[in-house]
Image: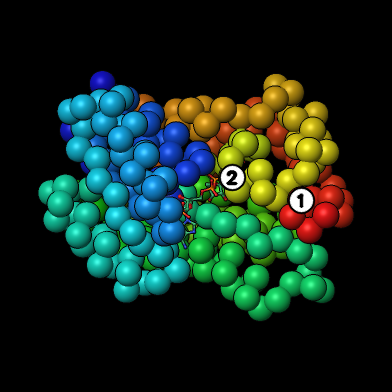
Amino acid sequence: MLLKGKNVFLTGGSRGIGKAAVYELVKNGANVAFTYVSSEEGAKDTLNNAKKLNPEAKVSYYKMDVKNSKDVDQTVEKAIKDFGSINVVVNNAGILRDGPIHFMSNEQWDEVIQTHLTGTFYVCRAFIDEFIVNKGGKFINISSICHVGSAGQANYSAAKSGIIGFSKALAKEYGNKDIYCNVIVPGYFKTELTDANASEMIVEQFVRLSMLQREGKPDEFGKAIVFFASDLSSFVNGDVLYVTGGLDTIPPYNTKRQKKKE
Ligand code: NDP
């Protein structure tokens, strides 16, 4: 078991690719503390399935809003207490609030930047002392192929680019203490997040632009998390792994991008 004895903290485990990551982590022997913000039902479902996959794994969930630094600090403290220590942290929680720049409200901009970029900073900051005391630890931060600049998603593109710069800076500041900080850039995975925001036409374009000519399967994202969480990545730090099926660009802006507004 690649992750036997490792304790992982993951944000946004109640749905989507975060849920799949929890499953891959426990299948590989890890204990997992994961968070949700609104969907306790989703969190319960993740926990029950994870326990079925590995009855020996310790799995717990916590309600936490990554936008709220006090909430983050308190939840991190509680998770460390409950699990004894945390060895790996995955910043996965995310939202979309799409729109063209000239119609984008302050709220749309702020909510996306705060959830992805500021939230990643809050969670990493809260764990640095723990990793220093443990003489090492691993951060895995989730960006997006949209970091190359996605029309209609300026807030999201900026946040996801920012996560790459932030993660490289963290790796440079703390790498000499055996603290790792790597980034995963997912391509297109069908989840509630993408389902609610992309029309069928956009999905087809994502698939057509990828070298594998298909969407990602959530467990394929989970396997990349296992790689970074395990010793398989012992000489990888401050790096970016593309899990995109060979997607290096994204479809051009199209008014049908926003499914809900059609
Ligand atoms: P989902 O919408 O399916 O899940 C989002 C998760 O984040 C949920 O668990 C949700 O909790 C949690 N969350 C949302 N807001 C907050 C918050 N303020 N505080 C704490 N938790 C929060 O998204 P995906 O699984 O599709 O995406 C996961 C990550 O992967 C995101 O960072 C996304 O940007 C990135 N990504 C996804 C891609 C894809 O194709 N799916 C492509 C590229 C990147 P709750 O259920 O309680 O609301």
Task: Residue 192: give its label.
Answer: 2
- Element class at badge 1: helix
Mark 2 and mark 1: Cα distance apart in space: 12 Å
Residue 261: x %, y % from top left: 78, 58
Question: Which residue is at a point 58% across and 33% down the rendered structure image?
Answer: 243
* Displayed quadrant of residue 223: top left
Q: Nearer the viewer, residue 247 or 240?
A: 247
Looking at the image, can residue 191 be seen? yes
Identify which residue, 221 or 235, lies in the foreground.
Answer: 221
**Left or right position of 174 against 91:** left
Is residue 213 placed above or below 185 in the rendered structure?
A: above
Side of 142 where 176 appears, left or right: left
Rendering coords of residue 185 (x, y %) = 58, 42
* Residue at 59% over, 65% down: 112
Quadrant location of the N terminus? top left
Asked if residue 216 lies left or right of residue 53, the reply is right
Which of the labelled discs sits on residue 137, or is there none? Answer: none
Q: In this view of the protein, can residue 170 be seen by the observer?
A: no
Structural crowding at the residue carrying mark 1, measured as other residues with C-alpha within 10 Å and reported as few (<14), some (14–19) or many (≥20): some
Of residue 251 and residue 175, the one placed in the foreground of this image is: 251
Q: Is residue 2 above or below residue 92?
A: above
Report the side of 46 relative to 165 (left or right): left
- Considering every residue shown, the one lying at the far front of the view is 41
Image coordinates of residue 216 in percent, x first then y, are 61, 29
- Kind of residue sitting beneath label 1: Lys
